[in-house]
Image (tube, rainbow, N blue to C red):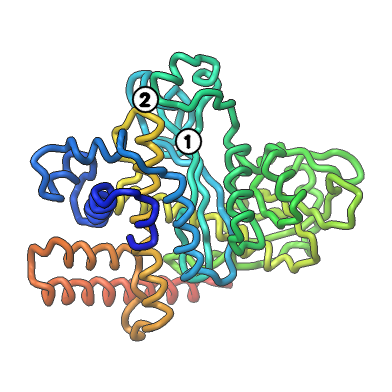
Amino acid sequence: MSRIASRFARVEPRRRIGLLVTGLLSDLPRKNCWTLAEHAGDATPHCTQHLLHRAKWDADRVRDDIPAYVVQHLHDDAVLVVDETGGLGKGTSTVGVQRQYTGTAGRVENAQVGVCLVYSAARGHAAIDRALYIPRSWTDDPDRCRSAGIPDGLAFATKPQSAAQMVERALDAGTPARRVTGDEVHGDTPHLRAALEQRRTGHVLAVSSTHVVTQAGRFQARALAARVPKRAWQRLSAGAGAKGERYYDWAQVDIQGTSGQPDLWSLMVRRNRRTGELAFHRCFSPHPVPMSELVRVAGRRWTVEETFQASTGLTCLDEHQFRRWTSWHRWVTLAMLAHAFPAVTAATERHDRPARDDLIPLTGNEIHHLFAALIGPVHGLAHRLRWSHWRRRHQARTRQCHYWRQAALQP
């Protein structure tokens, strides 16, 4: 909290922010203005609602402090990951809401969608930026935008355009990341790719099977993959998962770039070793790199799902229940800040005090659980620590069993 203290001119909002973030790190089953106000000892939720709506402070300045905190502790071998997350909404007055596809529901629903930027390093990962997607149905209606507090003159921006703006903001601020990865939404459209290639920043972006690439002609990605000879496939791991290394078959095909510079573009194809299902990634690197490096970057894309799951489950990223532009940005910013704390603390513990062989390393979930016990104890600390030790020992045994089973099944 001392990192963001200078962003508040008065002591009252600074103290109130501390109480709110502490509430987000508690073990409350639901976290919104009412439950957080009760946790803080307030008689009504009015003070918390005022803080998130009318109080004088700039959420963007607080957001700018989060990357510095995260990078200081997770700075090794980092990748930037862009993705979108949504929350279901009712009615038509909540800012940015309309019927649209959201991965949260897996279908088209009345929803509000935000684009997030995650800093993913070998030590851990955390969200460092966010942007609320405002559909064209909103930007074409100034009165509707004004009623939701959207700034005047805000132009429509697609999700890839918002992602490109966040990536450029992070790189301009000196965030150390050599490559960027994202899903098909960002890989199939040229906005993010063009912005990164102009900055000569590498990327490994997922694309659809119908994505068109140029290689002595124009081909869909699936057609180009069908021409890959058997000897070109390599078995590589996309990184360790909960049940062991994630092995797939991979192949790489050189494709034509968007300029005449001697840069390197390629289409990388991933094949599931059990089902044969294919996935495609469009890659760019200003310098030659082995395919294993690109595979490692592609594997980092899954960390954004872990970040969303942790932010939603631990700090209730999607439970804000706010209808206005300012309140959404303030809540999401504070949820990102709260989630960064257990992510950074777990990484520091794993680096400075490695776990015993019969325990898994401390996770962000476990740090959150222990911290919640410290700030709002119901049972004694010794009881909490005994349970923490039991959970980690049980998870270590489970993981070892998964590794043994995987080793036994490998050809």
User: Is 83 on the left-hand or right-hand side of 160?
Assistant: left
Which mark, by number, is residue 231?
none
How many numbered marks have been drawn onto this rendered protein structure? 2
User: Is 258 on the left-hand or right-hand side of 274?
Assistant: right
Q: Residue at x 42, y 65 (%)?
A: 242
Q: Residues within 10 Å of mark 1 (few under 14, many from 20)?
A: many
Vertical order, 278 against 409 (above or below): above
Q: Residue at x 41, y 25 (%)?
A: 149
Q: Residues within 10 Å of mark 2 (few under 14, many from 20)?
A: many
User: Can you give x and y, in whole percent of width and height, for residue 346 in the image?
Assistant: 37, 70
Local SS, label 1? strand
Query: Which residue is at the far bottom?
Result: 356
Q: Nearer the viewer, residue 213 or 404?
A: 213
Residue 24, visible in the rendered structure: no
Vertical order, 234 against 96 (above or below): below
Q: Which residue in the structure is indicated by mark 1?
A: 132
Q: Nearer the viewer, residue 11 or 160?
A: 11
Q: Which residue in the structure is indicated by mark 2?
A: 94
Amino acid under disc 1: Leu
Q: Quadrant of the N terminus?
A: bottom left
